[in-house]
Image (cartoon, grey):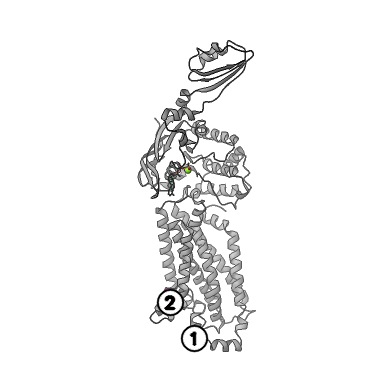
Amino acid sequence: MPEAAIRTEALVKDYGTARGLDGLDLEVLTGEVFGFLGPNGAGKTTAIRLFVDLIRPTSGEATVLGLDPRSDGVELRRRLGYLPGDFVVDGRQSGRELLTYLANLRGRVAATRIDDLAERLGLDTTREVKTLSRGNRQKIGVIQAFMHEPELLVLDEPTSGLDPFLQAEFVAMAREVAAEGRTVFMSSHVMSEVQRCADRVGVIRAGRLVTVESIHELGQRSARHVEVLFAAPVPAEDFAGVSGLRDVAVAGSRLTCRLDGPADELLKAIAAHPVITITAEEPDLTDVFFESFDIGRDDAG
Amino acid sequence: MLADSFTKWLWDRRRSIATWTVAVAAVGGFYAAFWPTIDSPDMRDAIENYPSGLLEALNYTDIATPSGYLSATVYGLVVAALVIVYSVSAGARLVAGDEEAGTLDLVLAHPLSRSRLALQRYAALVVSLVTISSGLLVVIVALVKPFDLTGISFGDLLAMHVHLVLFGMVFGAMAYAAGAATGRRAPAVGGGALLAVFGFAANGILPQVDGLEWIDRLSPFAWLNGGAPLQNGLQIVDLSIMVVLVVVLVATGTVAFERRDVSV
Ligand SMILES: Nc1ncnc2c1ncn2[C@@H]1O[C@H](COP(=O)(O)OP(=O)(O)OP(=O)(O)O)[C@@H](O)[C@H]1O
Ligand SMILES: [Mg+2]
């Protein structure tokens, strides 16, 4: 098993008025994309800011990239990229000015890296930040977190404000990081976002880790919605005996159903008739996830 | 250009620093240009008839010479007030302003320590004070001939400006320290304002109370102007007091900043 990129033990953060973390035990492996899922006020931002040494724990321990954020903060921050949950910067500067400054604080950032990322995300870096839309501002945040190719990316709700196209681009970028053996730790409210991107997902609630699951295994356990349009009407009985199939409905030449498990048997039953179109949706893991763990859907939007 | 937080701070505030430089030079120059009006027999008579307590409270005792006039009105009052306003507001912004705006998080997630960031910014504030003071110096030197500001040596003028910069550094350090320790601008500005009010009272009014004469020694205005650097050159004791105070304030604020949580 690879060494952990982030490990916490009984991490507690008491704000005095409220408890941010209440004994967090977490392990994020090197080279994975880890989704950190939880409702508002669960402690996601608190954990992330502890990792970057912006705040200090009340008790417990956190080790990030093998370092103690408190004593090795500078060395640690050299090796990680951070995107704050609320990305605000002084508006009276251009994107390029800001990114150049941040790159200079880091030391080595290849000159073309900023341009490449800006082009990839479709950001005009010559414009003043205050004239940019929220999503375009968020792009600057994403670029500054990725530009120095850090070993670990700690991202607080990275896709907030990004349109679906850019969310997809972000997913691709995160996957590339993991493919290079680097690590991504990202927080989110919604499972559907995390599932496209993450290898594993951890759920935090009221400052504690409730569960950690592999997205791959969850996917195998969850039902997919399948819809088939045939050239001619089909008899419903043909699909009655297919294993793993639920909610079978045939309306003339259209079959809709939910498939839980391997698709082989269903495909063979379908193949007995001339097919015009077939759609099988990616399962929404939200349901299976919250059903299996009885966490309650309200908790995670 | 934007190599570190020192140059970045100056660059981001280039317009503000330029404006302040022009404003301080303009206001200081304007007052200096009034000297020929003051230097008339009528005015001298008028001043001699003032109650001596009032003259002392206003530091106008030596107002009948060009250096005394500049010292009392320009450096001791108008420019001092402007420098306080600039230093306190800029000092409060070094850490606290940035933090309240929510923009400190990002920079502190980079590989530099909090002390380094904070000290670089305080150093940038000092540079901005030197810039502002230099603008005034140039204007005063230019006005010496046309407005008969005779009997002031350039060395003493420089000494006055050294005192002025340190005076600003004290107020900047006060606001910086309170802001760095709390992360909020209100205590930072409040701390600076309190020091200004106390300093003003301790310099002019309070010493007239019997038994409180000594309190003048605790006033930044006394460290600025009490030894009349414009007539007597550098006042080593006053400068030392200011340097020590700056070091203590900056160190205290920085240590507190290193230890606490950064708020979002
Ligand atoms: N500076 C602070 N002072 C006091 N309480 C705080 C502070 N920051 C966070 N908290 C509290 O700590 C708890 C966790 O907050 P945190 O911001 O970590 O949640 P989150 O999971 O990031 O929520 P969201 O999804 O809304 O971003 C909340 O109850 C919050 O009110
Ligand atoms: Mg949050």
Q: Amino acid at mark 1?
A: Ser
Q: State whether residue A254 is above or below residue A170.
A: above
Q: Amino acid at mark 2?
A: Asp
Residue B140 shown left or right of residue A83 in the figure: right
- Spot occupied by residue A64 in the image (x, y as percentages of width and height): 41, 41
- Is B219 inside the magenta-drawn segment? yes
Residue A14 shown left or right of residue A112 in the figure: left
Q: Based on the displayed image, in which of its 4 quarters is residue A26 positioned?
A: top left
- Closer to the camera, A178 or A138? A138
Residue sitting at x 50%, y 61%: B91
Tell me the element at label 2. Answer: helix
Residue sitting at x 56%, y 75%: B74
Q: Is residue A268 visible?
A: no
Report the magenta stretch's main SS. Answer: helix
Residue receiving disc 1: B52
- Spot occupied by residue B219 in the image (x, y as percentages of width and height): 44, 73
- Closer to the camera, A255 or A125? A255
Marker disc for residue B216: 2
For the record, the magenta segment spans B215-220
- Closer to the camera, A187 or A18? A18
Marker disc for residue A41: none
Circle nearer the N terminus (1, 2): 1
Crowd band around label 2 with a 10 angstrom C-alpha radius: few (<14), some (14–19), many (20+): many
Tell me the element at label 1. Answer: helix
Q: State whether residue B174 is above or below residue B65.
A: above
Crowd band around label 1 with a 10 angstrom C-alpha radius: few (<14), some (14–19), many (20+): few
- Is A113 inside the magenta-drawn segment? no
- Tell me the subunit letter for badge 1: B
